[in-house]
Amino acid sequence: MRFITAGESHGPGLTAVIEGYPALVEVEQEQINRELQRRQKGYGRGGRMKVEKDEVIFISGIRKGRTLGSPITIQIKNRDWANWAAVMSPLADVNGRREKDGETRVRIEADQRLTTVQSEVTAPRPGHADLSGALKYGFSDLRNVLERASARETAVRVGVGAFAKILLARFGVFIGSHVLQIGRVCGGEPRVLSAREQQVVDETLFRCSDPAANQEMKKEVDLAAKQGESLGGIFTVYATGVVPGLGSHVHWDRRLDGLLAQAIISIPGIKGLEFGLGFVGAGMPGSAVHDPIYYTPERGYYRKTNHAGGLEGGMTNGEPLMIKVAMKPIPTLYNGLPTVDLCSGQQVTAAVERSDLTAVPAAAVVAEAMVAWVLADAYLQKFGGDSLPEIHAAWQRYTEMIKWRPENA
Ligand code: EPS
């Protein structure tokens, strides 16, 4: 399978085309929308999330609630487009006249406040794609970079990931996430949550499993807001019910840990990740790190510990996938850092675009989508076929052959 996304943050909307998704999978808009809404939550988001109400539109590849095997196209509208139509117009002439570069536009926010928009941005924000993108493409207006570099694009990735999750659920695979740290405040352990726990966590301020930490995280974000700061953090993403033997030890580019790492690191702001014990394991003796192997006829092979995070030799080993992910603070600072204006060459303060103070809870939902995508693709590679029944039959044959049962089956 493969997918491509298109769309600018303040353009008309986002589009994704998914190719290679099997036929005869039942898909409902509501299932996709639930995931989109999970990504929109979290304390510390900017004004934009009050404007948007992400909903999927099915354009192709689905008929009467079931996939056809043909390319699936989905769209999410940007409600904010109405406010940016002149700035982001694809036309050289808007309302019969040519826009002047750098012209400042007036728009109305969701709360009806009047505010101005800098159509042209020339002071790159340290930490953002602004400068490298401008140099690479020869732009003087950073808006040509930042509109696509914006994490708005992750909305449609979550839509794509929802298709992957729907497919994986048919094989008993469930994927969730929760936040472990915002700024300096930590809470919760990197562990698998029950479906009920995950639902509860999704409704908390930071999607953190520790109620007291959620309150401390709120204080941390409120303080950051006062200081003109932004915050990063850490979250864990997990997958349960994953069959052993996905990925491969045979080739570097088929190792599943490598594929997962690429997919997760591709999320804006993600700077590091660990499988299982990760960096801590590097300082421990081997006997304390590796997970002893056990067997019972009912359960097949299993482990009592999961320090490996469900991956050995570039393959899944039948234990839950456990990944810990670090996100840097958002690069837009209300007290902008020193930078150089691309037009004047003068030392100035970085541009301020309306932004989030932190987006770690949302990034965790995006990471779920990327993990789901990589796993769904791995299932198709191992049990490949054109339709769900065909793939399912191959999966069943394999699980019987290796006598593998997910822990909760
Ligand atoms: C983002 C800036 C903000 C965020 C945006 C990512 O948007 P705006 O510039 O419109 O205020 O809200 O995230 C989203 C729109 C989203 O859907 O997550 C950025 O510069 O990356």
Image (cartoon, rainbow, N blue to C red):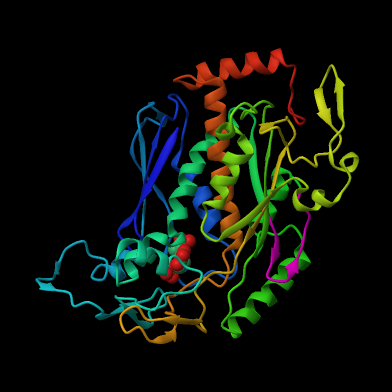
Image coordinates for residue 248, horizontal then vertical, percent: 62, 28
- Residue at the limit of the structure toward the left, as seen here: 96
Q: In the image, is 401 to the left or to the right of 392?
A: right
Q: In the image, is 179 to the left or to the right of 166?
A: right
Q: Nearer the viewer, residue 51 or 244?
A: 244
- The quarter of the image holding the C terminus is top right
Q: In this orientation, does residue 259 appear? A: yes
- The quarter of the image holding the N terminus is top left
Q: Residue at x 44, y 42 (%)?
A: 29
Q: In this orientation, does residue 51 appear? A: no
Residue 27, compared with residue 392, is above or below; it is below
Q: Residue at x 57, y 32 (%)?
A: 254
Question: Splitting the image into 4 quarters, where does residue 130 fall?
Answer: bottom left
Q: Residue at x 61, y 35 (%)?
A: 256
What number of labels is visible? 0
182 part of magenta stretch: yes
Question: Splitting the image into 4 quarters, where does residue 231 fall?
Answer: bottom right
Image coordinates for residue 295, horizontal then vertical, percent: 86, 22
Image coordinates for residue 102, horizontal then vertical, percent: 26, 79
Residue 85, compared with residue 373, is above or below; it is below
User: Quarter for ligand 1?
Assistant: bottom left
Image coordinates for residue 230, horizontal then vertical, percent: 58, 74
Q: Nearer the viewer, residue 369 or 144?
A: 144
Q: In the image, is 83 to the left or to the right of 320?
A: left
Q: Nearer the viewer, residue 206 or 305?
A: 305
The span picked out in magenta is 178-190
56 part of magenta stretch: no
Residue 330, compared with residue 254, is above or below; it is below
Residue 36, compared with residue 184, is above or below; it is above
